[in-house]
Each structure stands twice: as C-alpha cells, then as structure tokens.
Image (cartoon, rainbow, N blue to C red):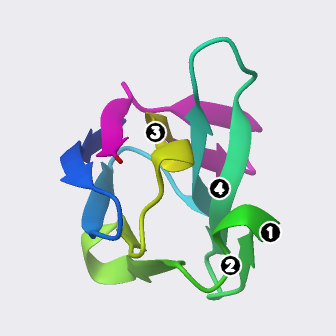
Amino acid sequence: QLQASGGGLVQAGGSLRLDCAASGGTFIMMGWYRQAPGKQRELVATITNSGGTNYAESVKGRFTISSDNAKSTIYLQMSSLKPEDTAVYYCNAKQLVPPMNYWGQGTQVTVSS
C-alpha cells in the first residue's frame, strides 16, 4: 500500500527528501512519523487530502510536507537537518471508509554531526 524511499546519510545542515507512494485506497490524510532508538514513534508532519498541513514543533521551519494527488504521493523535504533528526521515518496513511491506518516499511535517516 505504501512505498517509502529517499532516506540516507547526510551531514548536519544538509537536506534530504523522502517520498511515499500510496496505492489501493482513498486516503483522507497521509504523513510521516519517526522513531529514534529507544524512543517512541512520533509525528513529524501530516497533510490532508485538501492540503492542510500539521508539523511537529521540532521540525517547523525546516521540513515541508507536500503531495501530488495525481500520483498519490507525498513528499517530505527536510532541510537544516540536525543529528537529533536521526531516526527511522515511517509513512502513514489514514483511510476513512473502511477506517484503516496503513504504515510503510520505514526508511532510515542518519544525520552526522
């Protein structure tokens, strides 16, 4: 259902873009979550099917979430990356009917200092 790509290793201050392609459903909201070692999974950013966005305070001004509805794909442009952004990033999609919550396979983002 969800295919994420674009993770990797980058130096602090650098940029990366994550892509997530969805298939097989109609989603009212998609987004990115992340989980660092020893920590709980946390919200990074979400975007609704009408374009409304929401960001974690820790990434506001540095990350931008966007979507291409024709391709059923969302993007997370990450800039000014910090070592504390290091985590496995998971794509998420929420379906209304029937109510379902899908997760992608996760992609590793590592920011070196």
Question: Quick check: can you spot residue 90?
Answer: yes
Q: Is 36 drawn above or below residue 46 in the view shown?
A: above
Question: Quick check: can you spot residue 98?
Answer: no
Chain-order first, disc 1 or disc 4: 4
Chain-order first, disc 2 or disc 4: 4
Q: Is 54 drawn above or below residue 83 in the view shown?
A: below
Q: Residue 3 carries which label?
A: none
Q: Quadrant of the N terminus?
A: top left
Q: Residue 44 carries which label?
A: 4
Q: Kindly give the residue lying farthest to the front in the view shown.
A: 113
Chain-order first, disc 4 or disc 3: 4
Q: Nearer the viewer, residue 108 or 48?
A: 108
How packed is label 1: few (under 14 Cα within 10 Å), some, or many (20 or more)?
A: few
Q: Which three-letter amino acid code belongs to the residue tagged 4?
A: Val
Residue 53 in the image: state x and y as whole percent: 69, 81
For the residues labelled 3 and 1, the Cα–Cα distance comes to 16 Å
State the residue at coordinates (53%, 79%): 62
Chain-order first, disc 3 or disc 1: 1
Question: Which residue range is magenta in the image?
Answer: 91-112
Q: Which mark is residue 86?
A: 3
The residue tagged 1 is 57
Q: Does the magenta stretch include residue 45?
A: no
Q: Residue 60 carries which label?
A: 2
State the residue at coordinates (30%, 58%): 18
- Classify mark 3: helix, strand or loop: loop
The reply, left or right, for residue 28 in relation to residue 85 is: right
The reply, left or right, for residue 94 in relation to residue 66 is: right
